Amino acid sequence: MVERQGIVVWFQHMKNVRQLKKHGHLIHVSKKHRYAIIYVNREDIDSIEKKFNQFAFVSKVERSQKPFIPTNYENAKPDKAKQYDYKMGI
């Protein structure tokens, strides 16, 4: 599997979204707030981010921090009362 990361691109006009599609997998576009979320390969993220910044219609480019946030919760303790209810079949 290829490592992927999201990029949030803030733009000025909706008509330019078609140009953004060519560089990655377009996930979401907000018409009201004028941003798009695009997933790209992590090894190509630097070059694609430079391309986006060169476009005249792009206001700002941000990288998603999701791949760097730890998602294993070792200290989470299950609730004893809930475990008992599940065993009873309630």
Image: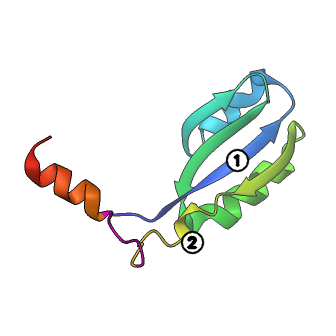
* 63 lies above or below 19: below
Taking the spot 64% from the left edge, 58% from the top edge, the residue there is 64
Taking the spot 39% from the left edge, 78% from the top edge, the residue there is 74
Dot 1: few (<14), some (14–19), or many (≥20) neighbours within 10 Å?
Answer: some
| Residue 50 location (% of width, % of height) | 78, 59
**Mark 2 to mark 1 CA distance (whole Å):** 16 Å
Residue 82: name its quadrant: bottom left
* 64 lies above or below 38: below
Taking the spot 87% from the left edge, 30% from the top edge, the residue there is 12
Tell whether position 10 is magenta: no
Query: Which quarter of the rendered picture does the C terminus lie within?
Result: top left
Tell me if 90 is positioned left or right of 77 in this view: left
Verify CB contact (< 8 Å) between mark 2 and mark 1. Answer: no
Residue 23 showing in the rendered view: no
Taking the spot 70% from the left edge, 29% from the top edge, the residue there is 17
* Label 1 element class: strand
Say which amino acid is labelled 1: Val
Query: Which quarter of the rendered picture does the N terminus lie within?
Result: bottom left
Determine which residue is flagged by label 1: 8
Residue 2: name its quadrant: bottom left
Q: Which residues are magenta?
A: 75-79
Tell me if 76 is positioned left or right of 16 in this view: left
Tell me if 34 is positioned left or right of 57 in this view: left
Residue 32: name its quadrant: top right
Determine which residue is flagged by label 2: 68
